[in-house]
Amino acid sequence: MLKKGFFLSLMIVTIAWSLHAWGSDSKNYPGSMCVLKEAYLNEDYWITTDIGRANGTFYNEYEVTVGAVCPMLADEITYYSANVVVDNPSGATFECRLISMDLENPANIWLEYSYEYDSGVQEMSFDVSDDPSYDKPLHFMLCFVPPGGKIVRYYVYEDGGEIQ
Amino acid sequence: MKRWLLGLLGLILLSNPLWADDIKWHSAAVGMPYFLVYDYALSSTSGRLENNNPDWAMYMHFPITSDYINALPTTTMPSIHINVALDGAYSCNMYANPDTGSSSYTALSLSDPTTGYEQKTWSTVPSTTIARRYITCSIPKYDGERSGVSGFRMYETGSDHSNDKKTYTGSMCRAINPNDGLRIQTPFIYNVDTISRTVFCPIVSDNTGDLDAIVYVYDTNPSVNFSCTLRDINPTSGSYYSYSGSSSGSSDQIQAIDFSSVTSHYTNGYRGISCSIPYEYNDYQSVLAGYVVNEQS
């Protein structure tokens, strides 16, 4: 009886693990995937050169906060979890927004904010509990990187798709 | 225990995607110069990122999309194949940097390459804990012929590559000419110029089978349409299969440019979509919003 129970338990765990694997997706992106959001910042400041990509990060070498658009290769599914690792040497406000936009109707947009105020390498996470299920979602992150700050990497689990 | 139960258990174990391998073909158009310079070139037909500077070599940076999140293997990392066009001294490094601390990498160098496409492979990549991975390449200067990188493919163990569907933001697209009047808004790419401009939008492929794709655009120009071409490019010869599509008229509504059946492809081809974005018309800018690529197994 013990032997049968053991194998049954093992089988259940294996099936559950397999279903989990088939039903989720994961991606890990270096910060250097991010691109500068608009060269023009305000009437007094033009960024005429691109952003630094030291060691695979998105590195703000400027004296002003810049926007970074960080794309994701969405699998037409919802978020399961999303995190971003940042380096914030100054301890200034480091804001990131996780955004899901309906590609077929971009007026439909969902976003979740996350903030970091501490200095050093920090990991920020997003609450994705109410992520909508658009048929064709554009998943991306928008960060406002303070001077000297870096987006180190970001990683996302998506729910309901395939592992790719 | 009954045999059929053991058989089922074995079948599940064997078919579990966690033990399958993953391959990703990255078009070089995911990359960019390490420092912004205005003399790189991005081929509108092949997505090759090239050095157009006659005076000095240029560092190019290529981020790698990885399926790994929690941990990397403690043993040998998957190999990466890189396809390059060589003309003179050249080197590439692949990095796997942990969030903090020192980086690790394996250098791939060529001291006396011949002209033309070559494919080089990293067979062993150092293991690390959680990491970001990327490649930097030094591309020789322009000397009557442009050198560049056409793409790279990556093998990962522990994940799968089967049917796939991915949605890309317009911000993934790159201007063919670095001085072009294109602007990244969240997360679209706009043409703010007075002439039509071309972008190349990379595809990160899990396989090289059939696919279909849709490009979503706002065409606000009544005189010019979006003109898009999806290509499957042979990395060694530069030849390609191409499929064309366009927008229709002008509208403030989003339009879909449909590539419904792409069935001609190379065994190790790289893929991408080039689009000519209409010029700004009466202060209304045309926009490439995003693109969806559905790969078949």
Image: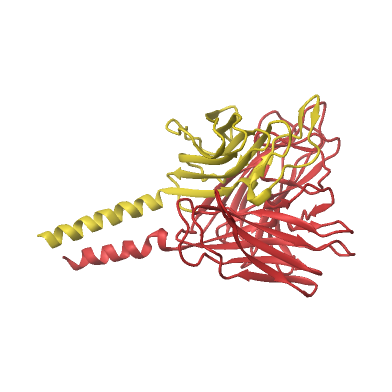
Query: Where does residue B26 sit, x and y in percent of width and height?
Result: 63, 57
Spot the yellow chain and give its letter: A
Q: How many marks?
A: 0
Quarter in which the N terminus of chain A is drawn: bottom left
Determine if residue B230 is in view: no
In the rendered structure, the answer to whether residue B114 lies left or right of residue A69 reads right
Q: Residue furthest left?
A: A1
In the rendered structure, the answer to whether residue A77 lies left or right of residue B251 reads left
Residue occupying the point 22% across, 63% down: B5
- The front one of B264 and B145 is B145
- Note whether B34 is above or below A76 in the view shown: below
Query: Where does residue B3 sit, x and y in percent of width and height?
Result: 20, 68
Color of chain B here? red
Residue occupying the point 61% across, 58% down: B95
Query: Where does residue B73 sit, x and y in percent of width and height?
Result: 46, 61
- The front one of A161 and A11 is A11
- The front one of B160 and B231 is B160
